[in-house]
Amino acid sequence: MIFMVTNWFPSHKSEEVTNIQQSIPQQLPPSIKKWQLFTTADGKRGIKTYGLIFTDPEKVEEAGLYITRVMGLFGGVEGYTWKVETLMGMQDMAKMQALQL
C-alpha cells in the first residue's frame, strides 16, 4: 500500500519544521520501504509538502502507526496541518474490481 501525506505550514515556520524533520531518525522501520518528500510553494497557505510512503503490504497497520507518530511531532508548530490518503496502483485497482460484493 502507498500512503500520501500532504502537509501545509506558514513560510515563516520553515526553520522550525526543518529542525523537527532533522530530529527524525533516517533509518525507516521495516514496515516502510521508501518515503519520498516533495515540496512546493502554496501561495497564501505557505509551504506544501507531499510525502509518498511505500509500505510493506504485510505491515500496513504498523506503517500507519509510525506515520501518525511522525506527523504528531509537528503538532506544536502553529499553522501546521496535514492529511493522509491511501493510494492504489493499477494492480490494486484490478484486484478491487475483481472482488465479489
Image (cartoon, rainbow, N blue to C red):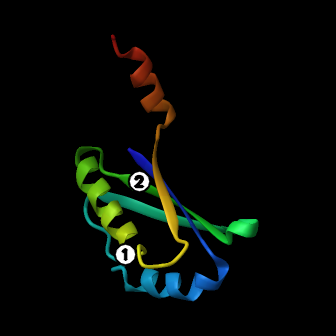
Q: Which residue is mark 2?
A: 54
**At 34% across and 61% down in the image, what residue appears?**
68
Amino acid type, callout 1: Leu
Measured from the top left, where is residue 38 in percent x and y? Answer: 60, 66
Measured from the top left, where is residue 31 in percent x and y? Answer: 27, 57
| In-front residue for pair 50/55 | 50
**At 58% across and 83% down in the image, what residue appears?**
13
Please indicate whether residue 20 sits to the left or right of residue 13 in the image. left
Q: Residues within 10 Å of mark 2 (few under 14, many from 20)?
A: some
Quadrant assignment for the C terminus: top left
Please indicate whether residue 71 sits to the left or right of residue 14 in the image. left
When asked about the image quadrant of residue 10, the answer is bottom right
Amino acid type, callout 2: Phe
**Label 2 to label 1, Cα distance in Å?**
20 Å
Q: Secondary structure at mark 2?
A: strand
Q: Which residue is mark 1?
A: 73
Vertical comparison of 96 with 19: above or below: above
Looking at the image, tell me whether mark 2 or mark 1 is earlier in sequence order: 2
